Image: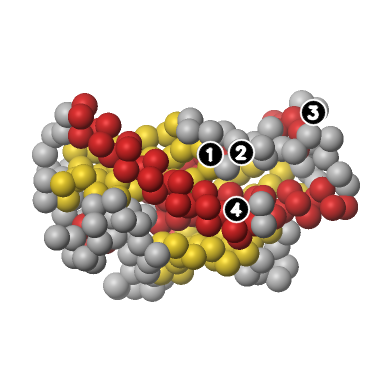
Amino acid sequence: MRPSGRSPDMMREIAMIPNFNAHAEGSCLVKFGHTHVLVTASVEEKLPPWMRGKGEGWVTAEYGMLPRATHTRGSREAAKGKQSGRTQEIQRLIGRSLRAVTDLKALGERQITLDCDVLQADGGTRTAAISGAWVALRLALDAIHKASPFEIDPLANQVAAVSCGIYEGTPVLDLDYDEDSVAHTDGNFVLTSTGALVEIQATAEGAVFDEEALLRLLRLSRIGTDAIFAKQREATGR
């Protein structure tokens, strides 16, 4: 029995509230159970120096956690003067995931930054951030298109992410903190709506796992991302 009472293939309740921020070109408050992440998409009609003159745009991400997103207060990384290795790894993952489904040439010479701020954490913050970031990016691109239509939609496919792991010997979907903290295997799966794999991060935390276990986790991740894709379409009206 999982601590939450969920079956092995059951997601936590998913909610995606679009246009949560009144100022950003696109935004989404995404909730995976008690994990809540606010994602905003900001459009700039300029590029980093190393991207200029290539005839294409750029999508990048930043990630952070509020001090009381967890059970005890954590110091703001800005106060420390540097980001942790975990923060840098997660925001790079978010950026890679969104660029995997974005046609940067169709985007044109502009940059979109996705700011992912964890308001409350209960496991799966990076996967919730990726899933909500797609909604924020979609809404931002729709805003651009309304003012200056794209010849080709830069975002033809969806991308979503979900955690899977082995809890007390059983592969389970969408781990919360109680499971994630003691899971023998912990993995994050990033998939597109066409069924393609963007990235898999899977680690044996307490016991090694075999190929069959990995395939079972992958099958669970497809169940989870299908549910997320449906919520993304609902949030964006597509």
User: Which residue, given by chain and number where applicable, does mark 2 sit on?
Assistant: 157
Which of the 4 image quarters holds residue 150? top right
Q: Secondary structure at mark 2?
A: loop
Determine crowd level at label 3: few under 14, some 14-19, many 20+ residues with C-alpha closer than 10 A: few
Marks 1/2 in contact by CB < 8 Å: the verdict is yes
CA separation, marks 1 and 2?
6 Å
Query: Horizontal and vertical percent for residue 76?
Result: 44, 66
Q: Secondary structure at mark 3?
A: loop
**Is residue 118 in view?**
no
- Residue 233 is marked as 4
Query: Horizontal and vertical percent for residue 146?
Result: 84, 53
Between marks 3 and 1 in the image, the one whose residue lies nearer the viewer: 1
User: Which residue, given by chain and number where applicable, does mark 1 sit on?
Assistant: 193
Q: Residue at x 19, y 38 (%)?
A: 204
Q: Secondary structure at mark 1?
A: loop
Q: Mark 3 or mark 4, which has the lower sequence index?
A: 3
* Left or right: residue 93 compared with residue 157: left
User: Which residue, given by chain and number where applicable, does mark 3 sit on?
Assistant: 55
Query: Horizontal and vertical percent for residue 191?
Result: 46, 38
Determine crowd level at label 4: few under 14, some 14-19, many 20+ residues with C-alpha closer than 10 A: some
CA separation, marks 3 and 4?
30 Å
Marks 3/4 in contact by CB < 8 Å: the verdict is no
CA separation, marks 3 and 1?
27 Å
Q: Nearer the viewer, residue 186 or 155?
A: 155
